[in-house]
């Protein structure tokens, strides 16, 4: 069964209240997906809001935090989140690219007992991150341009998911999770699951629905 990480990217500050978090948790989501944007790597800047949101969740919720850093200065921002003990911190390959720096970030996150992921935007090929796969826990494949909620799913990314799944099989990395983020709903979820993903990130499809639990169930049972 697919795991569901619910994105709070599109939620407004006034919406990020304990009642929303409680309703999502009781809908049996697996993670809160914390999209952290710096206004540089992506246009949106929500550093203050997401930090406040994550701090609140770390105190009131038992659901793990799935932190997605859409930022240029990965080291500085990840240091803000490590004390909150998230389940996983994922950063963008496109923000780093330098191998030594990539490995240092990976090791720093793991040394704090936190799982680490690498995210790749639509223009990045999976082969570009192949050498890092044995050292990480998750690859996040973006099926939209990062930084904006409610975008249309880019169907060409299905081949990328399949390529990564084959790469995982060929290199005996069966514990490596494929997470997919962008345009996920009750229709696209079937396609990404068939292509080989293990976890999906869904935002507006869940948070704009009248019944969170039913929406989550539809995604999980796709």
Image (tube, rainbow, N blue to C red):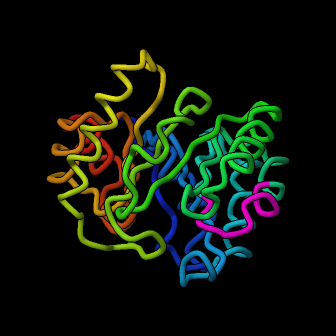
The quadrant in which residue 184 appears is bottom left
| Residue 61 sits inside the magenta stretch | no
Q: Which residues are magenta?
A: 69-78
Residue for point 51% across, 37% down: 138
Asked if 164 appears above or below 120 in the picture, the reply is above
Relative image position of residue 53 (x, y in whole percent): 68, 64
Residue for point 66% across, 45% down: 61
The N terminus - image quarter = top left
| Residue 76 sits inside the magenta stretch | yes
Query: Which of the two residues, 110 or 217, is positioned nearer the viewer here?
Result: 110
Relative image position of residue 210 (x, y in whole percent): 30, 63
The quadrant in which residue 142 appears is bottom left
Relative image position of residue 105 (x, y in whole percent): 74, 46
Left or right of residue 30, residue 169 in this image: left
Residue for point 60% across, 69% down: 16
Asked if 25 appears above or below 157 in the picture, the reply is above
């Amino acid at each position: 069964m697919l795991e569901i990480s619910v994105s709070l990217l599109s939620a407004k500050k006034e919406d990020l209240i304990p009642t929303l978090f409680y309703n999502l948790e009781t809908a049996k989501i697996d993670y809160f997906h914390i999209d952290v944007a710096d206004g540089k790597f992506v246009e949106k800047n929500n550093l203050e809001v997401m930090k406040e949101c994550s701090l609140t969740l770390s105190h009131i919720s038992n659901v793990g935090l799935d932190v997605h850093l859409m930022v240029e200065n990965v080291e500085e921002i990840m240091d803000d989140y490590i004390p909150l003990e998230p389940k996983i911190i994922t950063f963008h390959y496109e923000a780093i690219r330098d191998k030594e720096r990539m490995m240092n970030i990976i090791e720093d996150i793991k040394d704090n007992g936190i799982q680490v992921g690498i995210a790749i935007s639509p223009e990045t090929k999976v082969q570009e991150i192949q050498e890092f796969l044995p050292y990480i826990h998750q690859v996040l494949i973006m099926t939209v341009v990062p930084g904006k909620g409610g975008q249309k799913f880019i169907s060409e990314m299905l081949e990328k998911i399949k390529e990564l799944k084959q790469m995982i099989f060929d290199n005996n990395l069966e514990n490596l999770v494929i997470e997919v983020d962008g345009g996920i709903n009750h229709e696209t979820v079937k396609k990404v699951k068939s292509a080989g993903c293990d976890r999906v990130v869904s935002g507006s499809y869940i948070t704009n629905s009248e019944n969170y639990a039913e929406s989550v169930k539809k995604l999980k049972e796709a």
